[in-house]
Image: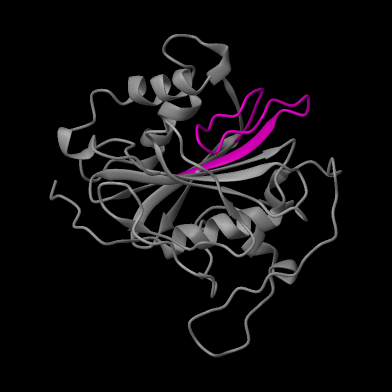
């Protein structure tokens, strides 16, 4: 399965890579995020506080629904006071928030994820995992991020059903920092991640994928849960996106 998923990622973007970015890998609305109304394994809710840069009182995730959902022009949350990663293994030295309570997963053979995280044990819809994505490809400056996303929810070029996802709603525009971005929500029989893959379950997979363009390079995040997604995981994914910085220069287009 891992080899097939990597093959899909490489096959869809074969014409977009240059040798400068083949040296490493990185990259994941009304009712909270459209998840199932009855969690498969509900757990006691833990309050998580978003810490803004200013000293003013911060809202709690549980009392601020907009922090718990992706929606139009709403793909990021203020980063929390959690630690940051060291420079990740992608070619551009990405640094992101390392959320409290989440566990790092070995990357193994993945070429598209530079960080994989597993949710804490008190979350619903476990296992739930986040993959930080890069090596997604190079596109002309000004490319619509929805066009980039399309490669990941349309049928696989080889017709392999393991890569089939059911789009929930439609792709939606937002921003990450100053970059244009877009996301889509989906369900699937199998996990679409590699290092952050979920084991097969009768409940299937529920996920979100967010892509943004930094310069003319694609970066993003994938969030998947078993049968649903705990809204707190969405809040964390949005914090990671907003915390993203680079320690190495991005090549000029």
Q: Position of residue 55 (x, y in %)?
A: 54, 90
Q: Residue furthest left?
A: 252
| 69 versus 190 height, above or below | below
Q: Is residue 205 left or right of residue 82?
A: right
Q: Quadrant of residue 3?
A: top left
Q: Quadrant of residue 100?
A: bottom right
| 241 versus 160 height, above or below | below
Q: Is residue 37 left or right of residue 32?
A: right
Q: Residue at x 78, y 56 (%)?
A: 122
Q: Main secondary structure of the magenta part?
A: loop
Whether residue 211 appears in this view of the structure is no
Q: Nearer the viewer, residue 223 or 108?
A: 108
Q: Position of residue 184 (x, y in %)?
A: 54, 39
Question: Is residue 21 found inside the magenta-colored segment of the image?
Answer: no
Q: Position of residue 127 (x, y in %)?
A: 70, 41
Q: Residue at x 85, y 49 (%)?
A: 42
Q: How many numbered tags mark residues here? A: 0
How is the structure coloured here? one colour
Q: Residue at x 69, y 68 (%)?
A: 61
Whether residue 8 appears in this view of the structure is yes
Q: Is residue 28 left or right of residue 189?
A: left
Question: Is residue 190 found inside the magenta-colored segment of the image?
Answer: yes
Q: Position of residue 234 (x, y in %)?
A: 62, 54
The stretch in magenta equals: 186-211
Q: Is residue 240 left or right of residue 101?
A: left
Q: Nearer the viewer, residue 123 or 156?
A: 123
């Amino acid at each position: 399965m891992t080899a097939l998923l990597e093959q899909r990622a490489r096959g869809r973007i074969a014409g977009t890579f240059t040798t400068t970015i083949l040296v490493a890998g990185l990259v994941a609305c009304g009712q909270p995020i459209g998840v199932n109304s009855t969690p498969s394994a509900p757990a006691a809710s833990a309050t998580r506080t978003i810490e803004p840069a200013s000293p003013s009182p911060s809202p709690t995730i549980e009392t601020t629904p907009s922090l718990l959902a992706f929606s139009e022009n709403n793909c990021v949350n203020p980063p929390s006071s959690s630690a940051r990663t060291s420079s990740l293994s992608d070619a551009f030295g990405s640094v992101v928030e390392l959320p409290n309570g989440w566990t790092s997963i070995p990357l193994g053979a993945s070429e598209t994820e530079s960080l994989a995280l597993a949710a804490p044990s008190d979350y619903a819809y476990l296992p739930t995992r986040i993959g930080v994505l890069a090596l997604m490809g190079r596109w002309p400056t000004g490319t619509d991020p929805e066009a980039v996303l399309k490669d990941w929810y349309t049928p696989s070029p080889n017709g392999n059903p393991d890569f089939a996802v059911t789009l929930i709603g439609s792709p939606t525009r937002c921003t990450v920092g100053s970059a244009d971005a877009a996301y889509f929500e989906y369900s699937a029989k199998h996990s679409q991640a590699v290092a952050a893959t979920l084991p097969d379950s009768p409940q299937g997979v529920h996920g979100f994928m967010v892509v943004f363009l930094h310069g003319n390079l694609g970066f993003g995040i994938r969030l998947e849960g078993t049968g649903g997604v705990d809204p707190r995981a969405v809040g964390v994914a949005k914090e990671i996106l907003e915390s993203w910085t680079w320690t190495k220069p991005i090549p000029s287009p």
